[in-house]
């Protein structure tokens, strides 16, 4: 009896002195805290954790819906359409103090290519072939987001995209699975850092899982006919790489994958992602994607849609409130087991604990001038923009602009524009923060040459009244710098286009300026590859600027002047015409690859610019690759080296792309596949050695339709530059 009384007294003392429950003890392990908290929660509290509402004014026209007016303090997550940390902290305070268990809210937002310091769109980033620089810029984005109240970004997008009519091609890293994987991993590392609990880390979200980039005809939200073979060899590899890199969350896609929509696909969401890859974070639906299962024809109503999505592996419902409205009844009907609810809630809480939200739930309040656009942040954005620019054409060394040039006619709707240089998905970017092309030219050429400006035309329409002024100033100048391209709303979500050509008004302006006989340097700012069949012959030089964000003018001007040597290379093919789509570098071989049999009869079959194309102001000479052995077995590695010499007169950076091809396999292989890349700066007259270490299982095997890796003996080729060399793999 005395022993029992003593225990009761000790317990009473612990309560009096406020011993924290296990889930609130920072020193305890994440798993112990998760288990303890789930065990304390009511069913309603659990269901709330699986729902995401909105806070603030929604500025994304593609996501229809008002701000959620009533915010239960126990809600799992909010999309934070604001940059006000004070507002965020007030809402978080309500969750911490008014909910029974004090579970923090997870605040998410689309931080795609920068928060306020907007850097180049993702497609442009891949042109840099510099993943380390991408990581640095993503770290800046993460810090600015954290200081604005964001814990979680819906990025990176790693959908392999081979149809530039699809507007969202701008958000990913091009047509190659390996490139998407490497830049996806670089982005995840930038956002999440070494540890999610670091003060300026945010959780990454891989999207859109999976096959979304294959939407029929490049039309958004459409059916995707993805074979099992294509799924494993093309669309899943970037996701697997990013999961291995520690990506915290995944977003299910809008598209229907061969009859089973991505947001109700147990095979991809559970069998592959959770069981095969061991992902222990959570999956969130895309905006209203669960309700859209009704429109896709696999659910009769919201209740069934919620059931199918949840049982397939979608833990959190973005915005449409289906989980909250239907789960109690589905559980009562024993259609959803409570054990699965507990597991799903644990996945959500695990991410919150890893982010440190239970221990530091509030955002540090700092003035805007200390949060955004720091000099070092803008310098990083400019550096990435500089390395993302691709010199597509340079007839007779039109560029860099020689010293004999005294005046430049700066013409075109993009020349003084600041809004459209930001690109799509730049919600917090402000045109006032953007350096225009014209401003960059002023900074670069101040007191050196004269700039003569005329807008010439708008981005679209039929108004040619500005042509005469443009032609007049062109006649007064030594060279024409024509700045054309796309408005930022022409790419991104729900921005598909039947033709990827420039609007006719822009092409007509170029035709008129060509009549002056002056050299024309065409600068393009766009979010996708463009059809340039009629444009390319009229320009002496073509510079692909893409949509560079806040720092585009000076990097471009530096390239035009020659202060900077362009080093970008395309991560996606530019078709000659829209009618060539799809065309990409790693297609399968034709059954009749001779005498142009099966090719188009009315246009050339070759695209205008292949994947990997990009010119420099210097020249690089590739030596003969040297193999460490001509023959290896399946457990050996093979080292390949190539010496690259800068044979020109200026230093330059060269991105060396390594390809492997397998000419005879049990499952046909693409004509070549990118397996490694590396970028180095090489001085004029100097050489650098580039090395590729081939691991047979990693680099020579391929998946079958179940994802099983197959490694077959036989002849292989490694290709670098214009050099191709054979080696043999033996049993």
Image: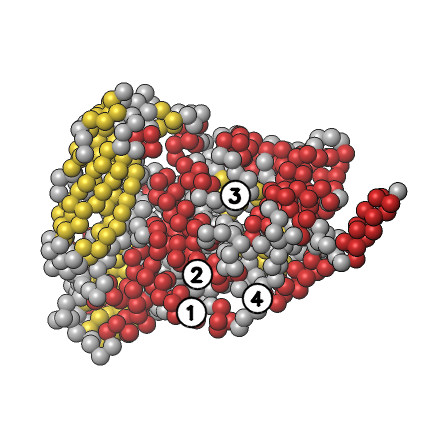
The part of the image, by quadrant, that contains residue 454 is bottom left
- Is residue 364 visible in the rendered structure shown here? yes
Q: Which residue is mark 4?
A: 364
Of tags 4 and 3, the one toward the viewer is 4
Between 665 and 467, the one nearer to me in the picture: 665
Residue 250: mark: 3
The alpha-carbon separation of the residues under discs 1 and 4 comes to: 17 Å
Q: Which residue is mark 2?
A: 140
Left or right: residue 475 compared with residue 685: right
The alpha-carbon separation of the residues under discs 4 and 3 comes to: 27 Å
Of mark 1 and mark 2, the one earlier in the sequence is 2
Q: Which residue is mark 1?
A: 374
Of mark 1 and mark 3, the one earlier in the sequence is 3
SS of the residue at dot 2? helix
Between 383 and 690, the one nearer to me in the picture: 690
Q: Residues within 10 Å of mark 2 (few under 14, many from 20)?
A: many
Of tags 2 and 4, the one toward the viewer is 4
Give me the residue at 81% from left, 46% from top. Answer: 7
SS of the residue at dot 4? loop
Give me the residue at 30% from left, 50% from top. Answer: 129
Q: Residues within 10 Å of mark 3 (few under 14, many from 20)?
A: many
- Is residue 599 visible in the rendered structure shown here? no
Question: Is label 1 in contact with label 2 (beta carbons under 8 Å)?
Answer: yes
The alpha-carbon separation of the residues under discs 1 and 2 comes to: 9 Å
Find residue 131 and report its horizontal and vertical position in percent.
35, 51
């Amino acid at each position: 009896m005395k022993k029992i009384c003593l225990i009761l007294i000790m317990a009473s003392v612990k309560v009096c002195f406020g011993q924290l429950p296990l889930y609130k003890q920072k020193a305890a392990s994440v798993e112990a805290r998760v288990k303890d908290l789930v065990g304390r929660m009511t069913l309603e509290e659990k269901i709330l954790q699986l729902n995401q509402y909105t806070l603030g004014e929604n500025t994304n026209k593609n996501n229809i819906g008002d701000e959620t007016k009533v915010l239960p303090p126990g809600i799992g997550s909010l999309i934070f359409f604001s940059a006000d940390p004070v507002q965020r902290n007030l809402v978080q305070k309500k969750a911490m103090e008014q909910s029974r268990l004090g579970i923090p809210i997870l605040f998410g937002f689309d931080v795609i290519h920068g928060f306020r310091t907007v850097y180049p769109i993702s497609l442009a980033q891949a042109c840099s072939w510099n993943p380390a620089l991408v990581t640095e810029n993503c770290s800046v984005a993460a810090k600015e987001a954290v200081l604005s109240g964001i814990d979680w970004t819906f990025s990176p997008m790693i959908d392999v995209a081979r149809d530039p009519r699809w507007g969202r091609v701008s958000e990913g890293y091009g047509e190659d699975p390996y490139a998407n994987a490497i830049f996806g991993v670089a982005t995840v590392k930038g956002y999440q850092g070494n540890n999610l609990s670091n003060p300026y880390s945010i959780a990454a979200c891989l999207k859109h899982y999976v096959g979304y980039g294959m939407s029929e005809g490049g039309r958004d939200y459409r059916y995707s006919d993805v074979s099992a073979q294509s799924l494993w060899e093309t669309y899943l590899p970037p996701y697997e790489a990013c999961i291995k890199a520690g990506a915290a969350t995944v977003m299910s896609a809008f598209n229907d994958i061969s009859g089973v929509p991505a947001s109700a696909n147990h095979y991809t969401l559970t069998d592959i992602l959770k069981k095969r890859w061991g992902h222990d974070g959570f999956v969130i639906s895309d905006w209203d994607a669960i309700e859209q299962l009704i429109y896709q024809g696999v659910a009769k109503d919201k209740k069934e849609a919620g059931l199918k999505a949840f049982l397939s592996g979608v833990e959190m419902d973005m915005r449409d409130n289906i989980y909250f409205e239907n789960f109690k009844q589905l559980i009562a009907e024993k259609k959803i087991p409570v054990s699965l609810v507990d597991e799903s809630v644990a996945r959500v809480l695990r991410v919150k604990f890893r982010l440190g939200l239970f221990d530091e739930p509030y955002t540090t309040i700092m003035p805007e001038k200390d949060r955004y656009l720091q000099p070092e942040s803008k310098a990083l954005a400019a550096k990435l923009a500089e390395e993302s620019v691709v010199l597509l054409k340079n007839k007779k060394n039109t560029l860099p602009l020689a010293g004999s040039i005294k005046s430049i006619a700066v013409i075109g709707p993009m020349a003084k524009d600041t809004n459209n240089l930001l690109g799509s998905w730049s919600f917090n970017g402000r045109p006032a923060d953007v350096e225009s092309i014209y401003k960059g030219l002023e900074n670069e050429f101040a007191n050196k040459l004269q700039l003569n400006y005329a807008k010439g035309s708008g981005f679209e329409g039929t108004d040619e009244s500005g042509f005469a002024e443009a032609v007049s100033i062109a006649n007064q100048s030594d060279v024409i710098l024509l700045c054309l391209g796309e408005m930022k709303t022409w790419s991104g979500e729900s921005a598909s286009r039947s033709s990827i050509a420039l609007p006719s008004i822009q092409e007509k302006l170029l035709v008129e300026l060509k009549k002056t006989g002056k050299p024309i340097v065409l600068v393009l700012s766009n979010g996708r590859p463009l059809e340039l069949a009629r444009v390319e012959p009229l320009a002496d030089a073509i510079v692909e600027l893409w949509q560079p964000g806040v720092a585009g003018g000076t990097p471009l001007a530096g390239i035009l002047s020659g202060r900077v040597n362009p080093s970008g290379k395309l991560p996606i093919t530019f078709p000659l015409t829209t009618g060539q789509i799809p065309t990409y570098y790693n297609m399968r071989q034709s059954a009749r690859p001779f005498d142009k049999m099966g090719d188009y009869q009315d246009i050339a079959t070759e695209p205008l610019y292949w994947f990997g194309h990009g010119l420099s102001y210097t020249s690089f000479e590739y030596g003969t690759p040297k193999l460490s052995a001509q023959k290896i077995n399946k457990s050996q590695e093979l080292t390949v080296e190539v010496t690259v010499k800068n044979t020109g007169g200026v230093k330059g950076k060269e991105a060396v792309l390594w390809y492997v091809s397998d000419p005879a396999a049990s499952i046909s292989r693409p004509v070549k596949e990118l397996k490694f890349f590396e970028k180095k700066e090489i001085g004029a007259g100097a050489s650098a050695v580039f090395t590729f270490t081939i691991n047979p299982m990693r680099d020579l095997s391929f998946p079958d339709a179940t994802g099983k890796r197959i490694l077959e003996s036989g002849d292989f080729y490694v290709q670098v530059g214009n050099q191709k060399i054979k080696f043999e793999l033996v049993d």
